[in-house]
């Protein structure tokens, strides 16, 4: 939507300049008379903005030490097309202009305005919060050991949240923002054209949110274990489930709301939106299953390392086999349907997978 508006504004600016130039040339033609033989109609479409645009393309190419042939290969056009742009003979369409700007490491606005915005960098706050989380875990271990209220389950949960979620994601996101390599991101495809700077901004936003949420969760876990009552185990379960649900939901929302900014082609955006149906289904199914596990363990007083706990792990493995199989199949199917017919509707396999996942959840809870 954002790029469509930019295209509209861009074309509108071209037409306004065209009218001004046509009027100016019309006045000159009236003064000179028809004998000069200069065609006035449409002449403005090869003046003003086109001239400055051709100069910008040439200057950017020469500053980067790139030949016309090299730029043409990157843009999947002919060398003659690049030459015509630079000589103000023709004008690239808005989609090609976006590719040109992205190739030179700029947004469309930056390229048109001739300015370069500050490079996106990871702020210090996520790193500070990661250090604060590590300090919180250390203080809990010391305080818990000295007061006899050290809980192995709480300590393990704090490490999972603070190290495996917060720290590892911060290190990866920081590296991705610095290098521009997003190949390890979930859902990344080398066939999709991305707006690199917007992807970096999105990673910064997600990393900041993860850092704040993770630090708060670790802090609450420590406080609950040290000062909580006998219901501390239930508090730990609810807090971890709430953290996981909030984190997953927010990351899905960040990605979904950022599609217009991070993906250049509309076809890629539509395919990504279609894939969110199965993504949301998977998240919902997993949390329903985990909720059923927590309720069962509480009602039947199932302890860790017991036969009941081992049985739940077996049901969990079966559930993941069904849910992930449905998820990956439906992701491929959604992408294929968008390419072939331009629309997507969940099919029989989707509903069969839903029924199978629900059946496994109910059987796990009952048996």
Image (cartoon, rainbow, N blue to C red):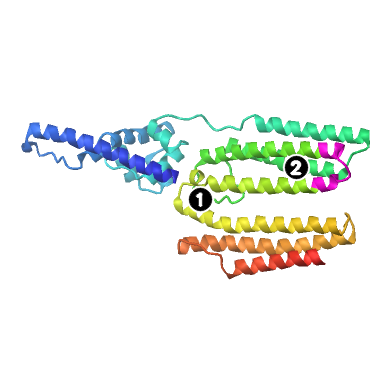
Mark toward the start of the polypeptide (2 vs 1): 2
Q: Residue 263 appears at what percent x and percent y?
A: 49, 47
Query: Which residue is found at the position 72% from the left and 68% from the top?
Result: 359
> Marks 2 and 1: which is nearer the front?
2
The picture places residue 125, in percent across and down from the top left corner, at: 66, 30
Whether residue 184 is visible here, answered yes or no, is no
Quarter of the view holding residue 294: bottom right
Q: Is residue 178 magenta?
A: no
Residue 167 shows which numbered tag?
A: none
User: Considering the numbered disc 1 on the image, is that residue within a helix, a strand or a loop?
Assistant: loop
Q: Give the range drawn in magenta.
A: 223-236
Left or right relative to 339: residue 20: left
Q: Going 60% across and 59% down the picture, which residue do you hit?
A: 278
**What residue lies at 21% left-to-right and 35% top-to-bottom?**
21
Q: Please name the residue that numbered disc 1 is placed on.
A: 192
Residue pictured at 25% horizontal, 36% vertical:
47
> Which picture quadrant has residue 226?
top right
Badge 2 is on which residue?
Answer: 161
Q: Label 1: few (<14), some or many (≥20) within 10 Å?
A: few
């Amino acid at each position: 939507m954002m790029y469509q508006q930019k295209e509209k504004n861009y074309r509108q600016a071209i037409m306004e300049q065209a009218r001004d130039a046509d009027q100016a040339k019309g006045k000159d033609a009236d003064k000179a008379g028809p004998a000069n033989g200069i065609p006035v109609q449409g002449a403005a479409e090869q003046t003003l903005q086109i001239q400055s645009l051709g100069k910008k393309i040439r200057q950017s190419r020469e500053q980067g030490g790139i030949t016309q042939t090299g730029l043409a290969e990157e843009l999947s056009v002919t060398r003659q097309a690049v030459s015509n742009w630079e000589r103000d003979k023709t004008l690239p369409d808005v989609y090609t202009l976006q590719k040109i700007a992205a190739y030179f490491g700029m947004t469309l606005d930056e390229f048109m305005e001739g300015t370069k915005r500050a490079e996106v960098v990871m702020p210090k706050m996520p790193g500070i919060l990661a250090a604060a989380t590590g300090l919180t875990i250390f203080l809990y271990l010391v305080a818990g050991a000295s007061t006899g209220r050290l809980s192995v389950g709480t300590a393990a949960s704090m490490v999972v949240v603070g190290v495996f979620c917060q720290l590892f994601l911060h290190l990866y996101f920081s590296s991705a923002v610095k290098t521009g390599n997003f190949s390890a991101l979930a859902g990344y495809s080398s066939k999709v054209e991305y707006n690199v700077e917007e992807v970096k901004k999105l990673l910064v936003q997600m990393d900041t949110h993860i850092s704040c949420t993770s630090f708060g969760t670790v802090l609450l876990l420590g406080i609950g274990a040290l000062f909580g009552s006998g219901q501390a185990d239930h508090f730990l379960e609810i807090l971890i489930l709430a953290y996981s649900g909030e984190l997953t939901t927010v990351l899905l929302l960040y990605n979904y709301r950022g599609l217009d900014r991070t993906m250049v082609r509309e076809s890629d955006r539509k395919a990504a939106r279609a894939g969110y149906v199965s993504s949301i289904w998977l998240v919902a199914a997993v949390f329903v299953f985990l909720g059923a596990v927590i309720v069962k363990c509480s009602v039947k007083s199932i302890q860790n390392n017991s036969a009941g706990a081992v049985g739940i792990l077996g049901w969990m493995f079966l559930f993941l086999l069904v849910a992930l199989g449905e998820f990956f199949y439906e992701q491929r199917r959604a992408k294929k349907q968008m390419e072939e017919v331009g629309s997507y509707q969940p099919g029989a396999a989707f509903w069969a997978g839903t029924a199978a996942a629900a059946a496994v959840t109910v059987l796990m809870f009952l048996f």
